[in-house]
Image (cartoon, rainbow, N blue to C red):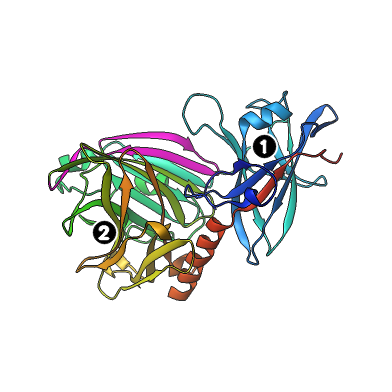
Amino acid sequence: MISQARVAPRGPSAVRRSVAGVAACMTLAGASSAVAQQGAPRLAVRAENSLAISRNDETIGIPWASLRQRLPDVQAGRVRVVEAGGGREVASQLVDGDGDGTPDALIFQASFAPNEVRGFVVEGAAAAAVKPRTFVRHDPPRDDIAWESDRIAFRMYGQGLKKTPSAMSSSGVDVWVKSVHDLVVEKWYSKGHDSYHVDTGEGADFFDVGETLGAGGTAVWRDGKMYRPDNFTAYRIIANGPIRTIFELQYPPLDAGGLEVTETKRITIDAGQNLFRQESIFRATGAREVPYVIGVVKRKGMVGIESRANAWAWLTGWGPVAPKNGGHGELGTAVLLPRDRVTDWKESDDHYFAVSRATSGQPVVHFIGAGWTSSGDFRDARDWWNYLDRFAQRLESPVRVTVGGAAAP
């Protein structure tokens, strides 16, 4: 799952839901929790899957300030995670989410069988280098920003695209499908723009987002009309793998039928996931509330489905990939948002979308993504819908994480 664990007290309150999409619910045990083994301080971590479903590639986050309190000798260059009982090292990453130069959290990933409890140990020792599984790149010539996990890739456009022959105005989310579990963005850009539209065995950019919402774009909604932002004007990369990638996009002021609105997006993608977390902050001049929509483009042969079965509702379109440039297989695109924030579902000639409201200056969170049959991860639409259901359940019931207790020698 994507997102960071939070600190909570023991007991039932430790399993509260968060609109921020928290991936793990954390309890901190007593102060005497670190012990030394061969000179290295150690801290025990217990993680429990409370659901009767498997959870692959859960991201667990431990606040850095809490680690420093319990392991004073831990430093940014000397911290790692291992499986309890002398097991293998687990890939980890320090994340500085606010960009102040100090880590905010140590994150690592683990997979869980249904109702499984697993143990880990945080050590004050240097971590081994790991193969990156997420990545973001800004491409200066076209002013694109493209990001990926080891499952799928996405792209959005900056102002530079308007200076090219296409001169396209689009804030929609583009999809690059992959049939390999490798990072491809850097390689595909190096091949040139025309080349990555043709599948040479790794997937391709078949999506053709155009001037639409694409796979999870947002727009201001007023008087039954969408007002889509222009291309982004600025970007900031905050973290770039190996487990988590984070970046921000700033959009120019938008005149939505007399309401001036700007939007800032923060996008977070974690390894192993087909969905990324998008936090949007809409700021309106002279208004407290901002009505908006989030949705997916509707294409020929596509079927739209929505579900409110879980606390996180989802909307998806599923259909064949256009055969242009050798496109093949079927593709699902989806958005998830809290069920209680959905005011309406709508279908137009060219989109499926959810209508919602944001408070000016306050973040709203969505999860957005895509799945392709030729990736090997999804056989058909039902596999994709099941994935969305499980993802929603995992958001609603985070892994329960307890930090503390003496780590076994």
Measuring from the top left, give residue 1's x and y in whole percent: 55, 53
- Report if the CB atoms under discs 1 and 2 are less than 8 Å apart: no
Label 1: element kind: loop
Which residue lies under the disc numbered 2?
A: 208
Magenta span contains residue 249 = yes
Look at the image and tell me whether residue 357 can be seen: yes
Range drawn in magenta: 233-257
Quarter of the image with the C terminus in it: top right
Compare residues 281 and 317 and report the one nearer the observer: 281
Which residue lies under the disc numbered 1?
A: 128
Q: Is residue 282 left or right of residue 18?
A: left
Label whose residue precedes the other's in the sequence (1 or 2): 1
Which quadrant of the view contains residue 371? bottom left
- The residue at 70%/45% (across/down) is 10
Compare residues 277 and 143 and report the one nearer the observer: 277
- The residue at 37%/52% (across/down) is 154
Q: Main secondary structure of the magenta part?
A: strand
Q: Amino acid at mark 2?
A: Asp
- The residue at 49%/46% (across/down) is 134
Measuring from the top left, give residue 45's x and y in whole percent: 73, 43
Q: Is residue 165 left or right of residue 120?
A: left
- The residue at 48%/42% (across/down) is 245
Q: Which mark is residue 316?
A: none
Magenta span contains residue 265 = no
Compare residues 141 and 54 and report the one nearer the observer: 54
Which quadrant of the view contains residue 213? bottom left
Residue 313 to residue 234: above or below: below
Q: How many marks?
A: 2
How far apart marks 1 and 2 lie (CA) works out to: 40 Å
Residue 157 to residue 344: above or below: above
